[in-house]
Amino acid sequence: MQKYFLAVLVENKPGVLTHVSGLISRRAFNIESISAGYTEEPSVTRINIVVSVESENELDQVVNQLSKLIDVIKIVNLSKSPSIERELVMIKVRANKETRADLVSVVDIFRAQIVDITSENVVIELTGSQNKIDAICEVLSDYEIVEIARTGTIALSRGPIPVKQM
C-alpha cells in the first residue's frame, strides 16, 4: 500500500467533509488521516487527506471521483511536489515524583513541550513528522500512556505557489 497526501479545496458549506470522506470510503480506500479547516479565504475549506491505495491508478480513481463533487474546487496531490508535512500530538502520561524527571528528559530530546502537569499526569505536546510522533509514542510506552490525541498530517507546498494555483 502506498500513502498519498491530497490537499482538497472545497466550498465552506455544511456536509462537504461528510461527502468527501464518504465517497472515499465507499470506494473501499483507506483514509489514514483527514483534517479540515479554514483557509485564507473564508468561503473555502481545506481538507487534508492521507489515503492508502494499491496503485497510482487507484489514486486517479479517488481524484476523479472527488473532482465530480459539486463543492470541490481543487485537488492537489502534494506527494508529487515538494511540501512540508506536520502532525500534532498531545499525550497524557501517568507521572509521579520518581518518573517526572525522566519524562522531562524525553520531552527535551524530542523538542516537545509539557503543556499541563498535575500530581498524577503530564500532558506532552509535539509537532513533527509522523515518524517522529510514532517514535515518541514508542518511548513513552515505557510509562503509562493514559490518552493520545493526534491531528493527522497537514501539509503546505514549498515555494511561492499556493495550492489553489497549482
Image (tube, rainbow, N blue to C red):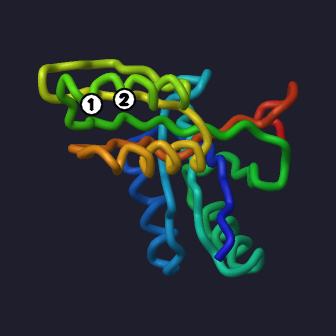
Q: How much space separates mark 1 and mark 2, taking CA atoms?
A: 5 Å
Q: 19 above or below 15?
A: below
Name which residue lies at 66% across and 54% down: 5
Q: Nearer the viewer, residue 121 or 88?
A: 121
Q: With 161 as the anchor, is 145 left or right in this view?
A: left
Name which residue lies at 66% across and 53% down: 6
Q: Secondary structure at mark 1?
A: helix
Q: With 118 as the anchor, is 126 left or right in this view?
A: right
Contact, CB < 8 Å: mark 1 with mark 2? yes
Q: 98 above or below 144?
A: above
The quadrant holding residue 62 is bottom right
Mark 1, residue position: 99
Q: Nearer the viewer, residue 114 or 59?
A: 114
Name which residue lies at 29% across and 28% down: 123
- Which label sits on residue 116? none
Residue sitting farthest toward the front: 98
Q: Secondary structure at mark 2?
A: helix
Q: Nearer the viewer, residue 68 or 6?
A: 6
Q: Which image quadrant: the N terminus?
A: bottom right
- Mark 1: amino acid: Thr
| Residue 65 spot, x, y in % from top left | 62, 70
Mark 2, residue position: 102
| Residue 51 spot, x, y in % from top left | 58, 64
- Mark 2: amino acid: Asp
